[in-house]
Amino acid sequence: MKILDRYILKKYLGTLAFMLVLLSVIIVVIDVQAKSPRIESNGFTVGYFLINFYPFLMVYYLITFFSILVFISVIYFTSRIANNTEIVAYISSGASFHRFAKPYLIAALIIATAILAVNHFILPWSNIKKNKLEIYTMNTTNREKFTANAQISTQLNPQEYIFINSYNRQMNRGSGYLYQKFDKNKKLLYQINAMEIYWDEKKKNFVISNYLEKRIDKNDHEILTNGDTKTQDFKHSPEELFPNELLGQNKTTPDLINFIEREKEKGNSNINAYLNELHQRTAMPVSIIILTFLALSLSSQKKRGGLGMNLAIGISLAFVFVFSFEVLKIVASGNNSIPPLLAMWLPNIVFGALAFYLYMKRANQ
């Protein structure tokens, strides 16, 4: 039995490795051809991006589609085994289908555990490297979301607010600054306006210039002061205060959980994208186990149409899985119609039920 276990494990891991290499080459070739004009128009060379960007982009893509690659790999090599009647011979020897499935479970658990660790701790580090350069591969419209000046409004807590009329996230500099602090009854206690604001990297705080400060005392008297420069310490970096949609990708899971909790305390209701990122990191590795057994159930019998039919079914189901996952991510990010936790786990729930049904049906034949 151990010989067959090693044989299946070798087939599983070997086919998966081949799929990973094949997908990597295809993605890099296609992506470089499509994005090289944008890369060069931003003052970079393709060679620089091949070293400093594409290795990290490939980590992101491979992790994102890992469960689908596992699914197709298992269908491919299991169909070949089935077509060679090797499974029939194994079952005829007196072993159960559950025993035949054991090496599949072992391989899936090993891979899922490794991907789980990568998702929570290693992928965020890789994403930091990727996201620094990714904006230079985008078209003008998408790039301006990260590079162009934008209006900023953020809530530090239920009593404190920041407004910046025009702020550049790359330069960490803006104009038209307003800070307000209220009491519990929403009465203004303190306000400061400034012409400009910028982040001092050495001192780790903001600096405002040409400011007008207003304080309101207990007798509702206004006390006005002004000056040339003043520091503003909000205890967080610009990336934390004014996060963009990529920030969640850059944080390890403990940091991401802390960030989400801080945003909740601030009263920020627009955190679903970060919750999606958090729940996805666990849901995707679990899908590796589910899709492994779904693929095994679909391809472990010799069918009319052979390998081609099994691959067609597998690719179709893979498309449905990815499509449903992405649609639910968008729906959960955009509004509160579906909780992010449910959105990220719903494909696993549906495909898990399908995999269990088909597996038990196949095992009882």
Image: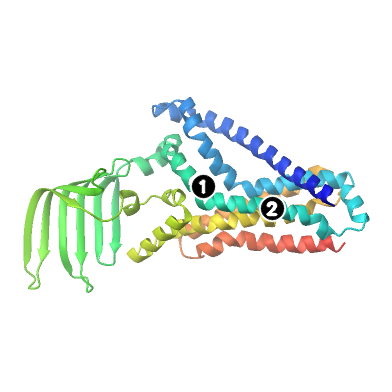
Q: Which residue is mark 1?
A: 122
User: Toward the viewer: 45 or 346?
Assistant: 45
* Label 1: element kind: helix
Q: Which residue is mark 2?
A: 108
Position of 102 compared to 121: left or right? right
Rendered location of residue 146, percent (x, y): 37, 43
Residue 28 is drawn in which quadrant?
Answer: top right
Amino acid tagged 1: Ile
Q: Earlier in the sequence, mark 2 or mark 1?
A: 2
User: Toward the viewer: 49 or 204?
Assistant: 204
User: Above or below — where is 105 with respect to 310?
Assistant: below
Amino acid tagged 2: Ala
| Residue 319 visible, this orientation | no
Position of 268 compared to 212: left or right? right
Residue 349 is drawn in which quadrant?
Answer: bottom right
| Residue 230 visible, this orientation | yes
Q: Residues within 10 Å of mark 2 (few under 14, many from 20)?
A: many
Residue at 59 percent across and 35 percent down: it is: 27
Q: How many marks?
A: 2
* Label 2: element kind: helix
Residue at 39 percent across and 29 percent down: it is: 42
